[in-house]
Image (spheres, rainbow, N blue to C red):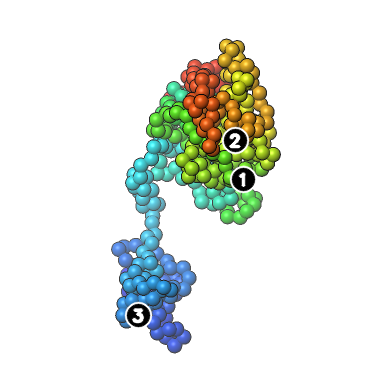
Amino acid sequence: MASMRTPISETSFLVQNWSDHSQNSLIFSQNLSFSRHGFRCLQFGIVKLPFSRSNAVKNSSQTRSSTEIESTQISDVPLLSTTEVIERLRTSRETYKSKQQYLAMFSSVFGGITTDPAIMVIPLDDHMVHRGHGVFDTAAIMDGYLYELDQHLDRFLRSATMAKIKPPFDRESTRRILIQTVSASKCIKGSLRYWLSAGPGDFQLSPSGCHQSALYAIVIQDQSPSDHIGIKVVTSSVPIKPPQFAVMKSVNYLPNVLSKMEAEESDAYAAIWLDDDGFIAEGPNMNVAFVTKEKELVMPSFDKILSGCTARRVLVLAEGLVRDGKLQGIKVRDVTVEEGKEADEMMLIGSGVLVRSVVQWDDKVIGNGKEGPVTLALLNLILEDMKSGPTTVRVPVPY
């Protein structure tokens, strides 16, 4: 390679034979390097630079100056040192504001925990990144306790089995790592999210080239204020995942994202999926439930959708409302759209929304158009359970 300080005109890479090329073009070798502002880069492939004595170049239907052509076709891409990369990552983090703060991350790739958000990264050749071969789960952090950690962890490992990913650690070691990550974060109220991937290795389709599966975990503190005001939902036109994939919590969330975007485009909070038989299924990242006119709490069956940990806990807590006479019964069964829209109450249930009233579905107002009393009661029961529930659902974090 020619010296980085050697002018282009003095390098041997410049093609001097003009007979085979247009006299209005300059041709450079694929290994040509450019020096400007102290940066170095390699241009891959043959670069053909249009050249005109009038300093104007016609490109399709556009007319652009030679300066513009030079800036787009010869760019100074710096070759950075590891230190420079970390500095730029840190600067990049500081340039944008987010309502979420990342307090700690564990990675089995580097075998430890970091509290520096700038280096909370994963390898590009991880098959979770370029093939979607990974699963994940979560757990809320409330007053220094992890809520339903074991329930979420069990589902996490079931998802891993369905995705044919063998965890790098046994269950107890994984559990200990998750608790230690929260401890290192010193987060008292927030959320823990964790992933299991086929691991880094190559860019092939098969994970056979992956050296080892990978575990990642991150502690998130969300600055968004709690909001329990009733919301609007719409019916999703995005196809629902087949049951084989819907029942596992994989990282393939493109249908979920498109469904959420569809709702936002209609000024709604979420879009509701229907299954292939036309029954109500779930939201993009939450379950749905109804209170019928007969005062029964009804929730769609879990055989074709994700078995929500929060939803299942709500079913248990709702038994107290039956004892108090506020509900006449609890059922998990198929629910038609007509029955759902005619219900007295509708709610979304999940680890993010907890329990949230739905006051309108498409053009149909649910009940009296206000937050339902049973929905609010279930929300209070979940909040109380998160703060003072039994040891089966609350795991203390040793800070």
Question: In this picture, is 120 found above or below 59?
Answer: above
Residue 335 appears in the rendering: yes
Q: Secondary structure at mark 1?
A: loop
- Residue drawn at (39%, 82%) of the image: 24
Label located before the other in sequence (1 or 3): 3
Residue 95, horizontal then vertical, whole percent: 33, 46
Do the CB atoms of the residues marked 3 and 2 lie less than 8 Å apart? no
Label located before the other in sequence (3 or 2): 3
Mark 3 belongs to which amino acid?
Ser
Residue linked to disc 1? 239
Residue 333, horizontal then vertical, whole percent: 68, 28
Q: For marks 3 and 2, give the one nearer the viewer.
A: 2
Label at residue 52: 3
- Residue drawn at (40%, 33%) of the image: 224
Q: Secondary structure at mark 2?
A: loop
Mark 2 belongs to which amino acid?
Glu
Residue 323, horizontal then vertical, whole percent: 60, 12
- Residue drawn at (50%, 22%) of the image: 376
Callout 3: 10 Å neighbours few (<14), some, many (20+)? some
Callout 1: 10 Å neighbours few (<14), some, many (20+)? some
Label at residue 282: 2
Using the rendered view, name the quadrant where residue 57 is placed. Answer: bottom left
Residue 44, horizontal then vertical, whole percent: 46, 68
Q: CA distance from mark 1 to mark 3?
A: 53 Å
- Residue drawn at (32%, 81%) of the image: 53
Using the rendered view, name the quadrant where residue 61 is placed. Answer: bottom left
